Amino acid sequence: MSIFCQDRDLLSSEPVIFIGGGFVGQELTSGSDGAISSATFTSAGSNFTSAGVTAGMVLCTYTDSPSEGSAMEVVSVDSATQLTVSVLRADADGDAVAPPAGTGLNFYIRTFAAQIAGISATLAEKLRQAVEVAGISSADFADSQQLRMTTATGSLSAIFVARADNATEQDANWVKAEHYRKQFARQQLQLRLAVDADGDGEAEQTRTLGNISLRRL
């Protein structure tokens, strides 16, 4: 199944889900021997490869309190003990921007891959229904900024719903969950699916997710 956004896309809108709390997120690895030099992060006691760390995830570092830490994107996994990291970039294809240097850093890497995968699957099914062409799968959908941000918004809604579990309706997490739910619904209606069936670079059909109808066969 295709995944339409990454943790870094969530970081751009809501760093709070990575820094400090974030019990919904899956923590892949953590330690207390982190070091940053230029755009290189190292931890001799870690094995980032076996932990499943990949580019696009988010590394958080702190000295005393996790809630006062810094979040940065993982640009690449260079070895079991070394990552290339960057201050959040405007363009995921841009050069890494070195975070402040440091040694003896506490750190952890969390991912919201489960929420992202769920929203990606939902959108993939809606896109499949929109084209109504046999053989179309999520792997056929080209990446776009619009699709990434729609997926990110839906993921954030799911994350804040989970964070608000057992909270009062005035809780800030519920407020954010509702905000992102409405934004997700609006962004879906703005998605346009261009179908280039013969691969000539020209779209023969353009569909909107606002026009989908389900048919009982």
Image (spheres, rainbow, N blue to C red):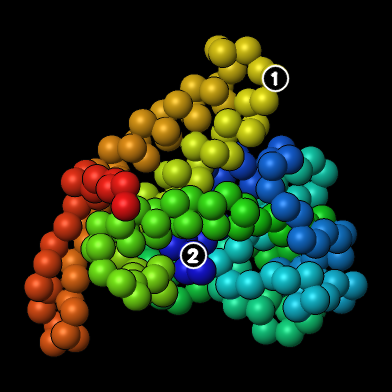
Position of residue 18 measured from the top left corner of the image (x, y, whole percent):
64, 47
Residue to which mark 1 is pinned: 166
* CB within 8 Å, label 1 to label 2: no
In which quarter of the view is residue 111 placed?
bottom right
Question: Residue 7 vs residue 185: left or right?
Answer: right
Quadrant of residue 76 within the rendered picture = bottom right
**Amino acid residing under circle 1:** Asn
> Depth check: 83 or 195 in front?
195
Residue type at numbered disc 2: Ile
Compared to 6, does 165 lie above or below?
above
Q: What residue does disc 2 label?
A: 3
Foreground residue among 84 and 197: 197
Number of numbered discs:
2
Mark 1: give few (<14), some (14-19) or many (20+) Cα within 10 Å: few
Residue 113 spot, x, y in % from top left: 61, 57
Residue 148 visible to an observer of this rendering: no
- Residue 42: percent from the left, percent from the top? 76, 74
Residue 110 showing in the rendered view: yes
